Amino acid sequence: MMLLAKAVLGLGSTIVLAGAYTFREGVLRIDVDEYRSGGSHVHLWVPAAAVPMAMHFVPSQHMRHVSAQAREAMPILHAFVKELKKYPDADFVEIIDSDQHVRMRTRDGKLQIDVDAPDQKVHVLCPLSTIEDVTRQIEEQAPGA
């Protein structure tokens, strides 16, 4: 009985530590609601650490192709993320039209993009550290890197 209790305690501790490690960077959240006949309602919550991990399973020829296409944008993206980290809670873009509202801001080290229109709502929340990790992995796959 004591052996079973130790095994359960060990397994439980492993699950808790794995969960804490996976969620250490936060959650990548994507919500899309279309208000039309047959419209989609997608609500996706993914541990932010899972995205860079999943990129290791992308075939190398595809990563090289993406890296080659994104080569010119990488310095801009690095500078963009670096500057966004300096402003952890700031509003950058807000556009208000008669029936549409678009907002881009940072909150608690996450990039938040909200689009509210009569026919759809889109909300994206992504930790800046995840964007950094993804761009670093794409750069590492660059031809000649």
Image: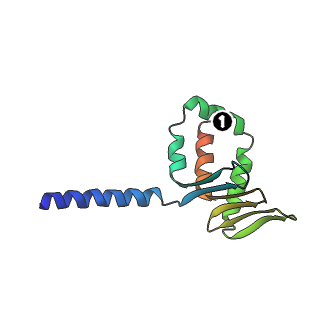
Quarter that holds the N terminus: bottom left
**Side of 56 relative to 79 (left or right):** left
Q: Is residue 51 left or right of residue 33?
A: left
At x 59%, y 40%, the residue is 140
Specify the quadrant that holds the C terminus. Answer: top right
Q: Residue placed farthest to the front in the image? A: 37
Q: Residue furthest top?
A: 61
Horizontally, residue 27 falls left or right of residue 91, namely left
Residue 19: name its quadrant.
bottom left
> Tag 1, which secondary structure?
helix
In depth, the one of 63 and 41 nearer the eye is: 41
Residue 107 image point, x, y percent: 65, 68
The answer to which quarter of the image holds residue 72 is: top right
Residue 98 in view in this figure: yes
Residue placed under numbered mark 1 in the picture: 66
Q: Nearer the viewer, residue 139 or 90?
A: 90
Q: Residue at x 58, y 56 (%)?
A: 28
Depicted 50 relative to depicted 85: above or below: above
Q: Position of residue 68 (x, y in %)?
A: 68, 34
Between 113 and 40, the one lying in front of the other is 40
Q: Residue, x 18% and y 61% (percent of image)?
A: 5
Residue type at tag 1: Val
Residue 78: percent from left, percent from top: 69, 51
